[in-house]
Amino acid sequence: MIAKYKSALVLVAGAALGAAAIEGLHAQSTAPVYVVAEIDVANIDAYTKEYSPLALASIKKAGGNVLAAGQKITALAGTPPKSRVAIHRWDSLEKAQAWYNSADYKEARKIGDKYATFRTFAIEGIPQ
């Protein structure tokens, strides 16, 4: 009788372990989300001194990673953005949207909007 309970316990434990492994693999295959911003800056000095530090801090606080940001843009086809481009990586679209709608970023944008116009969008990446 005890052998049956041991077998049942091993079977349940194996099923739980298998479910956990599948969930872990599913989490690893979640595609990242990239936020791309084309920024037309009217006053670069004020933008970099007043807006950029606040925006970067809000991204880091919300869990995003800045992959690229700057003015050295090389067009491969078509017309490049006028001033700046920034690219951030996020774990999910929900996290990117939460950052974009956060109080920290809204405060930063009040300053940024004085010095620049923004075209910002998100794109889902490819699972790695």
Image (cartoon, grey):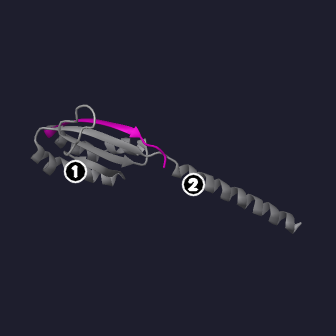
Splitting the image into 4 quarters, where does residue 74 fall?
A: top left
Task: Inspect this view and state whether residue 24 appears.
Answer: yes
Q: Answer left or right for 113 relative to 21.
A: left
Over which residues does the magenta segment extend?
A: 115-128
Residue drawn at (30%, 51%), measured in percent from left and top?
A: 66
Could you tell me the amino acid type at mark 1? Leu
Residue drawn at (24%, 38%), measured in percent from left and top?
A: 75
Residue designated by label 1: 54
Q: Position of residue 93 (x, y in %)?
A: 42, 41
Mark 2 or 1, closer to the camera: 2
Principal secondary structure, stretch drawn in magenta: strand
Report the residue that reaches farthest toward the front: 76
* Spatial CA span between label 2 and label 1: 35 Å
Residue designated by label 2: 24
> In front: 62, or 71?
71
How many marks on residues?
A: 2
Q: Position of residue 20 (x, y in %)?
A: 62, 56
Could you tell me the amino acid type at mark 2? Gly
Task: Inspect this view and state whether residue 101 appears.
Answer: no
Report the residue that reaches farthest toward the right: 1
**Vertical placement of 19 versus 4: above or below?**
above
Residue drawn at (25%, 48%), measured in percent from left and top?
A: 69
